[in-house]
Image: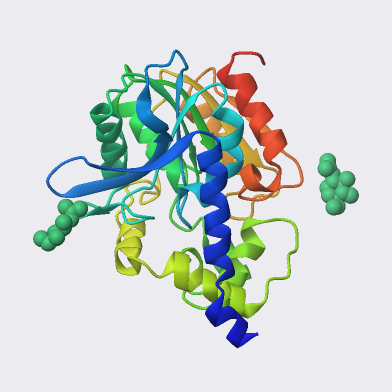
Amino acid sequence: MGAFASCLSIVSLYGRFLRRSVTAAGLSSQTVEIDGDTTIHFWGPTGRAATSKPQLVLIHGFGPPSIWQWWKQISFFARDFDVYVPDLVFFGHSFTNSSERSEIFQATCVAKLLEKLGIRSYSVVGTSYGGFVAYRMAAMWPERVEKVVIASSALNMRPGDNDGLLKKANVEKIEDLLVPVTAQHLRKLLHFVVLRRLYIPNFLLNDFIDKLYSENRKEKLQLLKGLSIGQDHTVNISPLSQEVLIVWGEQDQIFSLEKATQLKTLVGETARLQVIKNTSHVPQLEQPAHFNNILDNFLHDLS
Ligand SMILES: *[C@@H]1O[C@H](CO)[C@@H](O)[C@H](O)[C@H]1NC(C)=O
Ligand SMILES: *[C@@H]1O[C@H](CO)[C@@H](O)[C@H](O)[C@H]1NC(C)=O
């Protein structure tokens, strides 16, 4: 197995498959320098000819680069939307020399990217950490952000919320799970993130860590420390002016469903909550058809 793994990386092959799938949906890999310090890599429509399609921005969570988390949505939504899928700073091929680390900085980078591309208005979908970023974008630029989808993302988290999870996982710090360095920790993370029990051999988990988790590890840890959400015992979330959809896995092991029901009342009077049964923290990958349907109805105002 070792020799096989060393000459043929399954993760690299799968990455190639994902890039082909996203390319087939009409997107291409692009890089834009948004200021003197920061370069953002993203997937977006190839050769931006003026289209009459609305714009949709998908923002990934802590984990592998954007298309690993959104490929099932990209192929679905690219028919009706111009879909933009950035890698947040320190993920994929996005990088900064700036010392800023908060989710507000990430939100500013995505907004600057879209401005550079000449995109004036768009809807945003953010999952987990990406939900924090989407929320900040919606709050800071209400005139640009149309509709907002917050998926599996407890904007209302508080210090100590993770204690139960850490105990169950038998790890000391949340970063041991979110930025794993060992196959054992990545296995634990998958156990909580996906409801279905998968058996993944160690060599494959190590391949994952090597190809997808090892880059910019120090900076990723700083991103977790740099969050301005979740530091305070008093939740400080102002309602958004936009229409908001909250989507959650009923069995989410990272952010419990209770967080979602509280969040609904905090984020806006008209916020809707849709719960997806039999899924944990990544319903967009666990039940993509159901997830896509819910978003599609919301974005097209059909629900
Ligand atoms: C960061 O700084 C290095 C060294 O000055 C430079 O080579 C690199 O292009 C910079 N990166 C970005 C994203 O601006
Ligand atoms: C949830 O998963 C269980 C076990 O795989 C299955 O029996 C059940 O039908 C599923 N329920 C739904 C609503 O999909």
In percent of width and height, residue 60 lies at 46, 45
**Horizontal side, residue 296 vs residue 163: left or right:** right
**Horizontal side, residue 91 vs residue 98: left or right:** right
If the image is split into quadrants, where does the C terminus sit?
top right
In percent of width and height, residue 274 lies at 66, 31
Q: Residue furthest left?
A: 36
Q: Residue at x 75, y 41 (%)?
A: 277
| Vertical relation: 116 (above or below) 64 | above
| Vertical relation: 187 (above or below) 220 | below
Closer to us: 106 or 166? 106
Q: Residue at x 28, y 49 (%)?
A: 102
Q: Does the image show residue 237? A: no
If the image is split into quadrants, where does the N terminus sit?
bottom right
In percent of width and height, residue 231 lies at 36, 52
**Horizontal side, residue 115 vs residue 295: left or right:** left
Q: Does the image show residue 157? A: yes
| Vertical relation: 267 (above or below) 193 | above
Closer to us: 260 or 203? 203
Q: How is the image coloured?
A: rainbow
In percent of width and height, residue 143 lies at 32, 16
| Vertical relation: 115 (above or below) 278 | above
